[in-house]
């Protein structure tokens, strides 16, 4: 899969914010709204996040509507219903100021300010499939930065076998964390370091060309498109290089249902439902689920020789 970097873009492919917004308004008037506005054209476009480079990390599938992407969410820190995050998170979560602490088995440790990261990075738009373990799916145009270059800045040592991620823990901002007798807060997730360094692994700071909404994991979240959605941890405050498999919330809560790897695999059912098909939000008929969520060509090599039924 090719990716066009900023240096490959011609000046004619950079769209001014005024032109971009005018185009969005024209398309909305034509009935295309956000969906067509984001997918139209090539090169790069400007938005509230600055200049966003279009890349070849995209798929030729209809994107899920902005309304559904921002109002059908799992974010248990705001409740277990899909509608609760959109109702509660915008009024409670304070996404600024926000820093992400990077530490562990690396030569350099630091706290990275999210705004500094945005200002000093070439933001990319990537259109990825998103597959929830609950057997529903979306197609989302994320905006953000590749994970690997950020991690490489801190020079992980040879002991760094895994990368652990942690979500904000603050009951005042995340009232769902009061359910501490049920869920082992804070939310934690992890990847093998070669997974974290894979070109598809992405840190999102926006979607649909705008800053990431609170209910979608503002101000920064992980996106790992070949894994079930719960691996793509939201509202990250800490990243740590570790030597051992890090604890993760869902695996700790129900290891027989939520494995550490949790790669999308239609041949391995959840104990309580089939994973062979999925319901694409906005569509009536269910569709077959793709191995590795359709990214097998890029990531299957990471798991060569592993029993994908055992290491789910």
Image (tube, helix red, strand yellow):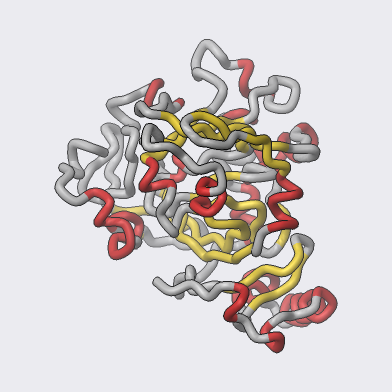
Question: Of 235 and 9, which appears nearest the observer?
Answer: 9
| Whether residue 132 can be seen here | yes
Looking at the rendered structure, the number of numbered marks drawn on it comes to 0
Quadrant for the C terminus, please: top left
Q: Position of residue 86 (x, y in %)?
A: 69, 42
* Quadrant assignment, res 55: bottom right
Quadrant for the N terminus, please: bottom left
Furthest toward the front, the residue is: 107
Residue at position x 64%, y 72% from top?
Answer: 38
Residue at position x 56%, y 73% from top?
Answer: 5
Q: Position of residue 34 (x, y in %)?
A: 68, 69
Question: Of 203 and 7, which appears nearest the observer?
Answer: 7
Furthest toward the right, the residue is: 18
Please give left or right for residue 152 compared with residue 93 in the image. left
Furthest toward the bottom, the residue is: 12
Q: Is residue 11 above or below residue 301?
A: below
| Whether residue 61 can be seen here | no
Q: Position of residue 306 (x, y in %)?
A: 17, 44
Please give left or right for residue 247 compared with residue 151 in the image. left
Residue at position x 33%, y 49% from top?
Answer: 264
Question: Of 294 and 202, which appears nearest the observer?
Answer: 202
Q: Is residue 306 above or below residue 170?
A: below
Please give left or right for residue 84 compared with residue 287 in the image. right
Q: Position of residue 213 (x, y in %)?
A: 70, 48
């Amino acid at each position: 899969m090719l990716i066009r970097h900023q240096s490959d873009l011609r000046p004619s492919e950079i769209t001014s914010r005024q032109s971009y917004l005018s185009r969005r308004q024209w398309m909305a008037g034509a009935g295309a709204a956000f969906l067509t506005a984001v997918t139209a054209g090539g090169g790069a476009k400007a938005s509230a996040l600055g200049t966003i480079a279009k890349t070849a990390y995209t798929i030729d599938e209809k994107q899920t509507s902005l309304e559904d992407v921002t109002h059908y969410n799992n974010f248990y820190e705001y409740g277990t219903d899909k509608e609760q995050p959109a109702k509660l998170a915008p009024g409670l979560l304070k996404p600024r100021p926000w820093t992400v602490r990077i530490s562990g088995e690396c030569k350099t440790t630091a706290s990275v300010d999210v705004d500094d990261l945005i200002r000093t990075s070439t933001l990319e738009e990537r259109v990825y499939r998103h597959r929830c373990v609950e057997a529903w799916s979306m197609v989302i145009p994320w905006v953000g930065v590749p994970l690997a270059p950020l991690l490489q800045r801190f020079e992980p040592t040879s002991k760094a076998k895994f990368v652990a991620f942690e979500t904000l823990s603050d009951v005042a901002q995340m009232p769902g964390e009061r359910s501490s007798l049920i869920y082992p807060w804070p939310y934690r997730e992890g990847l093998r370091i070669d997974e974290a360094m894979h070109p598809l692994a992405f840190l999102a700071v926006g979607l649909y060309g705008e800053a990431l909404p609170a209910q979608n994991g503002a101000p920064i979240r992980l996106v790992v498109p070949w894994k079930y959605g719960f691996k793509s941890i939201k509202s990250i405050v800490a990243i740590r290089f570790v030597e051992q498999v890090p604890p993760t919330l869902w695996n700790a809560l129900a290891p027989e249902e939520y494995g550490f790897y949790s790669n999308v695999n239609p041949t391995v059912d959840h104990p309580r439902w089939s994973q062979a098909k999925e319901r694409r939000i906005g569509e009536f008929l269910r569709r077959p689920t793709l191995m590795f969520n359709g990214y097998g060509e890029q990531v299957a090599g990471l798991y060569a020789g592993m029993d994908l039924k055992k290491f789910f």
